[in-house]
Amino acid sequence: MTDETGGHARIRRFLDEHAPASPCLVIDLETVRDRYRALAGSWPEADLLYAVKANPAPEVVGLLARSGAGFDVASPGEVALCLAEGARPESLSYGNTIKKRADIEYAHSMGVRTFTTDSLQDLENIAAAAPGSSVFCRILLEDTGALTPFRGKFGCSPETAVRLLQRAAELGLRAGGVSFHVGSQQLDPRAWDAGIAEAATVTAKLAAAGTVLDALNIGGGLPGRYTQRTPPLRDYVAAIAESIDRHFGPMGADAGTPRLVLEPGRFIVGDAGLLQTEVVLVADRGPADGRRWVYLDVGRYNGLAEAEGEAITYRIASPDKDGPPGPVILAGPTCDGDDIIYQRNVYHLPTDLGPGDRLHILNAGAYTASYSSVGFNGFPPLPTHCIDHRTDTGLRGSV
């Protein structure tokens, strides 16, 4: 399986010229630029807050800060990273609803003035530690069919959201708007409709009670390219715009169309990355299954956490061998029985594949290095190298 996009070609040249140790993730910054510009051009009036958790490489954050992006942050560490890379404090939104009061205090002391909540206790902590800040309330959505859903961990009912945003005003905070998330790697452009409808109901109820919300945060969920077919960006833009017009249009001037906020992560960095791995060994376990076991130097704990449940199925290329393909089971290098990458989904790789041969896991820029463990079984975290053909192609790494 091959991919001849410009970003992958540039990454392959870098790998051939510099031969970094395996495994490693390489990010093409020009692809990051292109994806951000595509979103900004499609939603020129929206606030685009990059979800730092998708890939926190300083080079990625710095590039997006210079491009005018805001940032969705979830911890003091992400706040500090964004500010160190030139982001303006007011461009940061603390979107994690699960946070210590000390973390709120730190973010506020650094200039962060927007927070998201979904519970009274957290709201009261924000009021005490970040007085006068703007608050979004996250509502809970039912399973929207995303490949990686949130399973009810975040959000509250619309009725609770009304009470919390009313209480926010009483506590001296500014009720900014409603937020929701349709789950990561969302393949249905219509999946945002239910959340927009709920948000419109909350907004209308608050407007009737005298509290006007001016924004709507529809989260992330825009997909990267894996083995599944994904709709084009224009389909998402059209479906979301139509839904907002339909649900918010009849409200009138006092509670009309809100300012739109998006939190893209995977869409911006996913297709910008290529993960290079080496074959450790190949084992034939007998005729019962008929598949070879191919063990890689990367697995669930040092870069491929999203292979859990085999929901995210990466495209894989073999640059070293091109013999006839045969079915394989792919597994990682650790002494953990769960460190199996793909068994239910059958991949076919060259039958002459052997130890030391490289494999390229394509479109792996999101949730790979950032999910990597600190050293499970003694295997180090996945190193990241960022390349930018506008400056140089030298080895620029961030771990």
Image: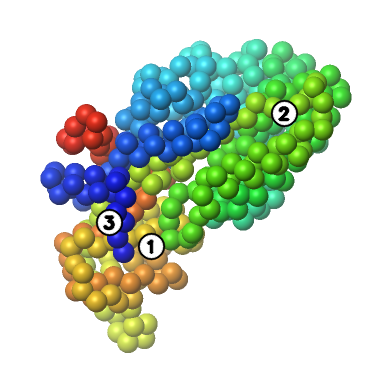
Residue 29 in picture, x, y percent from top left: 32, 36
- Identify the residue shown where x is 44% and y is 34%: 36
For the N terminus, which image quadrant?
bottom left
For the C terminus, which image quadrant?
top left
Residue located beneath label 3 in the image: 360
19 with respect to 63 (left or right) = left
- Identify the residue shown where x is 43% and y is 69%: 345
The residue carrying pointer 3 sits among few (fewer than 14), some (14 to 19) or many (20 or more) residues within 10 Å by Cα, namely many
User: Who is closer to the viewer here, 390 or 202?
Assistant: 390
The residue carrying pointer 2 sits among few (fewer than 14), some (14 to 19) or many (20 or more) residues within 10 Å by Cα, namely many
Residues at circles 3 and 2 in contact by the CB criterion of under 8 Å: no
Residue located beneath label 2 in the image: 257
Badge 3 amino acid: His
Is residue 196 depicted above or below 323 in this figure? Answer: above
Question: Residue 170, located in which quarter of the rendered image?
Answer: top right
Q: What numbered label is drawn on residue 341?
A: 1
